Image: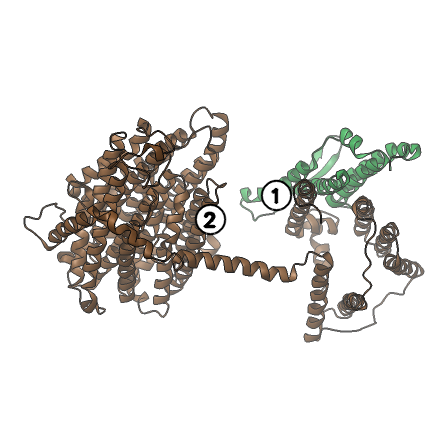
Chain colours: A green, B brown
Amino acid sequence: MRTNDVMLKTATKVVTFIILMFAVHIFFAGHYTPGGGFVGGLLTASAIVLLMLAYDIETVKKIIPVNYVMLTAIGLLIALSTAAASIFFNVPFFTHAYDYFDLPLFGKTSLHSAALFDLGVYLVVVGVTMTIIQTIGEDE
Amino acid sequence: MSLVFLIFLPLIAALFIPLLFKKLGRIHTGWFVLIVPVILFIYYLTLLPTTLEGGTLVSELSWIPSIDLAIVAYIDGLSLLFSLLISGIGALVVLYSIFYLDKKREQLHNFYVYLLMFMTAMLGVVQSDHLISLYLFWELTSISSFLLIGYWYTRDRSRFGALKSMMITVFGGLMMLGGFVLLSIMGNTYSIRELIAQAPELAGHDFFVWALVLILLGAFTKSAQFPFYIWLPDAMEAPTPVSAYLHSATMVKAGLYLVARFTPIFAVSGTWIWLVTGVGLFTLFWGSFFALKQKDLKGILAFSTVSQLGLIMSLLGASAMGFHVENAAETVFKYAGFAAIFHLVNHAVFKGSLFMIAGIVDHETGTRDIRKLGGLMSLMPISFTIAMIGSFSMAGIPLFGGFLSKEMFLTAMLAITEFDLFSMDVWGLLFPVVAWIASVFTFIYSFYFVFHTFAGKHKPEELPKQAHEAPIGMLISPAILAVLVVAIFFVPNFVGKWIVNPAVAAIQPFLYDSPSDVHVHVAAWHGAITPELAMTIGIFLIGGLMFWTLRKWQRSYDAFPDKVSLNRLYDHFMYMSDGGANRFSAVYMTGFIRSYLVYMFGFFFLIVLSTLFLNEAFAFDLTNLAPIGFYEIVIALALVGGTITILAAKSRLTAIIALGAVGYSVALFFVIFRAPDLALTQLVIETISVALFLLAFYHLPKSSKKEERIGFKVGNGLIALGVGATMTLVALSAHSQKILPSISEYYKETVYSEAGGGNIVNVILVDYRGFDTLFEITVLGIAGIAIITMIKLRLTKKEGQHENK
């Protein structure tokens, strides 16, 4: 299906970034407003899928040279170690910690270990979705 | 230094082995490994003075306190003796393996990791005071033995032997676990020391005999007693250092350790004495008798090990008799326990050296077939000397350690005839008779092993390699052991005092309060012709005569049919269970996704519906309903329309797009019902899955055969209806009755104060039910890997002979 679709390609160049920015926003907003790692990951994946539709898998692989299997593994590791970290503080497995900090530029910000766990979820979702799509897409 | 830490020292060292192998491949990895058992051996030596006084050491690592699970390292005479054997023989075996295994051709990192793993496991077995941790280490020895036997995993025989040993020893391990659980219920503790302390109360318990038999099953399988010994000859596929270490000196003695350790608890029982002594003696006879049938050097040694283990087992059984005899510490009944431990030490020493020699012969001539060997005496003089020392010790000839323990064994067996409990007075005579016959065969196979290899005619044309003496490094370990064999003969009471007595005191606390109470004087000459000496001389005469004529009668072994043997039984059992399981799963695993969906949906609606009606949970209540709005009707119509389109669609493309439409309609429902999180997720998911479907769509075959049979369609229709009806009923019932208050109130209250978040849905995902999410992403990861393998495997299969038919 390699048609030289100028409109799709041009729109994709802009839309992809909008989706990606939105994905990042959704990811960070998750704890207080709708969103989270899972949706964020899916949005990111959909942005990449859009790129793949507009161009082709080989081109996208050159643009984003990421090993998605590795990404999945890293995500799982982050999630697991966030959960496991609590046992070093002598609290039950999976106890989260959070506090509020005054950061430059951001002002009063809450930092939550759940965000780290969510980052793991995000990476796994992106990794697995893209692994599946890439593997099936590359087949034959 | 913490004793528990020392148990795990080899395992910790194992972590670095692959790295050392990769980065410092020039140096044989074994040199690094060697440090570990040497450190352990030296450290355990420093503990000898403690146990000499009858002292004990305990160190505890709490593992899961809530279920009272701890790793307790307990050092007394018995466990220290075994620890010394494990680390001492371990060091020698590692040294030997450095020259036996080539650093360029062999996968040393695997080998040494398994070996160190085994070391930890074995130390754990003999030092654990906690029943459950003992069991865990016990199974770990089985697993590491499995890995080591299967080390040359490309060979069929290796894999077969590995599996066989695993099946039998793990079966025994599980039985033993059952016995442990019963014991812990009886004594209300997991600690072996505490169980021993309440031994008299345990004896009357209903479970007592059950626990006894189950624990013995564990010990008999591990120590290769009849009829479970069949795994040991097949385990000889392991590299020879492993055979010398696991399958003669240490692991197979774990069963003996177990019996010794539990003797204080079970000695009161006649069943125990009969089983342990009887099975041990029979194994002794069986193993020594069939050792002569073997043609493989290691096969002879394997059967000889089986037989010697039986010997020690029977002595341990006899040592329990001391419990029933008045003032046994002063009578002939004191010998059995001492002889058991003494022979255990002797056996570890001489059998270790013999295995190493068998390995050297194999290494230098290229074969282990005793029919091809012969006349190596002049070519390999040092190996011959060592082999002779080991064999003569095994045969019980004076000037070698084995003579002393062998004679003490005969003394102990003769003592049984004086035992008048548990109908032993009727059968007691059988014991010395069987022991004597078995000893004759032991004598013959010892000679068979050494003289048919080293004496006789040299047959260079039958050997794959030009035979020559082994490199000096390979000879060091067996030479050290051979020196020990001779040394033990000359200073038996030194060995007895420092090593044997503390262990004996641990086995027979009912006889001795401390090791210094054990008054057994070992001597080669008692000043007169004793009955046991007469028996020994008889063994030499008859054994020598029979060895002389061996070639004439050895063929009669062929009369034993191969078809009726324990090995056949095992093969048959494996074949049946394997094939049976395959046939059973082939019945329902058809390979059609449709079948699997039928099972899933079928069970789903059957189970849910029957639960609903059995619990009379169905309710129908139309109060409290919101009015149905215009948008909802439109979306519902679109949903139904989409679903019908999927079913009716002729082309796949239409079906996929219609499926997308259904998904988006559901997302719109979420929007209307104010669930932005769900709506967002659903929208993105739909987008991506439509893209996925389109991708997969390319790979599907062009035309699919439509199944038109009416029965097939009715079946599908029924299941579809059933699932739909079930969901509807569940939804209606769930709405109509509120038995429990909604959990959302709790979430609302705590989401900010406790969890520090604002969005309940997300906080559920990452915090309240974080475990679910953790497992879900794990499953996702597995699914991703599955898809990769599926597609990659399919590709490679196409290249192979499995064409798509």
- For image coordinates 41% across by 47% down, the residue present is B141
Quick one: B556 or A104, which is closer to the camera? B556
Q: Quadrant of residue B784?
A: top right
Q: Subunit of mark 1?
A: A
Q: Is residue B199 left or right of residue B800?
A: left
Q: Position of residue B656 (x, y in %)?
A: 85, 51
Looking at the rendered structure, the kind of residue marked 1 is Leu
Quick one: B689 or B353, which is closer to the camera? B353
Q: Is residue B82 above or below residue B581?
A: above
Q: Secondary structure at mark 2?
A: helix
Q: Quadrant of the N terminus of chain B?
A: top left
Residue that extends furthest to the top in the rendered view of this protein: B26
Q: Quadrant of residue B613?
A: bottom right
Q: Is residue B625 left or right of residue B98?
A: right
Residue B346 seen in render: no
Q: Position of residue B162 (x, y in %)?
A: 45, 47
Please tell me if label 2 and label 1 are on a single chain: no
Q: Position of residue B706 (x, y in %)?
A: 82, 58
Quick one: A56 or B448, which is closer to the camera? B448
Badge 1 is on which residue? A80
| Residue B110 circle label | none
Mark 1 residue crowding within 10 angstroms, few (<14) / some (14–19) / many (20+): some
Q: Secondary structure at mark 1?
A: helix
Q: Nearer the viewer, mark 2 or mark 1?
A: 2
Q: Subunit of mark 2?
A: B
Looking at the rendered structure, the kind of residue marked 2 is Phe
Residue B240 seen in render: yes
- For image coordinates 33% across by 54% down, the residue present is B558
Q: Position of residue B171 (x, y in %)?
A: 43, 57
Quick one: A15 or B414, which is closer to the camera? B414
Badge 2 is on which residue? B160
